Image: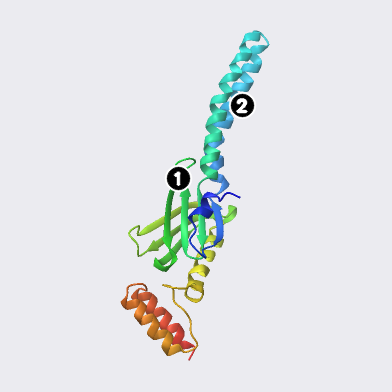
Amino acid sequence: MAKTYIQSMLGENERVLLVTRQHWFVLFSAITAEIFITLVIIAAVSAATLYNPLAAFGFVLVLIPVISAARDILIWNNHEYLVTNRRVIQISGIFNKNVVDSSLEKVNDVKMSQSFFGRLFDYGDVEILTASEIGVNLFKRIGDPVKFKTAMLNAKEKLGYEGTGAHVRLADDIPAQIAELDELRKQGIVTETEFQAKKRELLAKM
């Protein structure tokens, strides 16, 4: 069975935890005008056909807004936001794909904003602040932003426990774990902030 585009991007032992898109309001607002134009054309051509049978050829005009609406639907459907156990990924584009991802290790902060209607209809903006070159990654009007933010924070928390290789490994000896973390910090794999946070967490368990 052929791999999907998403599966082809995943690394070894990387798995998708959550896939979401922009809220359906975004799609609806994009195709509202096309739906209205389609209905107007159908009504106008139907009325004109009563007096002139040749007016039925006007139904060809319906293809214009229909094709435009189909394009908007494809754009919306192919704009996806993913949380894996290692990254946050944004994919857009129907044929030409544009992929932006942020490593969970470099995520410093996550901000979520919801308006009154956003809370009512369950959509909002999620802003990810990272230590990478991207700096800020903004996901606008995504569906169920609370679930998205929670999945991302949980994945980041588990990263230190489930990772291998460059990821932090837990051992039975807490001092040894701190020493290992310090070594990773010196190598630049773990940031100073991450090191101090994990160190306090480990010391609290002693």
Residue 22: tell me if it is visible. Answer: no
Relative to 81, residue 182 above or below: below
Q: Amino acid at mark 1?
A: Lys
Regarding mark 1 in the picture, which secondary structure is present there? loop
**CB of mark 2 within 8 Å of CB of mark 1?**
no
In the rendered image, residue 132, in percent from the top left (x then y), is placed at 35, 62
Mark closest to the chain's N terminus, 2 or 1:
2
In the rendered image, residue 111, in percent from the top left (x then y), is placed at 44, 62
Seen from the viewer's position, the closer of residues 38 and 165 is 165
In the rendered image, residue 81, in percent from the top left (x then y), is placed at 50, 54
Regarding mark 2 in the picture, which secondary structure is present there? helix
Residue 5: tell me if it is visible. Answer: yes
Determine which residue is flagged by label 1. 97
In the rendered image, residue 97, in percent from the top left (x then y), is placed at 45, 45
Q: Is the residue marked by circle 1 packed among few (<14), some (14-19), or many (20+) residues within 10 Å? A: few
How is the structure coloured here?
Answer: rainbow
Q: Is residue 49 left or right of residue 75?
A: right
Relative to 176, residue 62 above or below: above
The CA distance from mark 2 to mark 1 is 33 Å
Q: Amino acid at mark 2?
A: Leu
The residue shown at (53%, 43%) is: 76
Q: Which of the labelled discs sits on residue 39, or is there none?
A: 2
Q: Which residue of the protein is positioned furthest toward the bottom in this rendering?
A: 206
Labels 2, 1: front one: 1
Q: Which residue of the protein is positioned furthest toward the front in this rendering?
A: 1
Q: Is the residue marked by circle 2 packed among few (<14), some (14-19), or many (20+) residues within 10 Å? A: some
Q: Which residue of the protein is positioned furthest toward the right in this rendering?
A: 50
Seen from the viewer's position, the closer of residues 26 and 2 is 2
The residue shown at (54%, 28%) is: 65
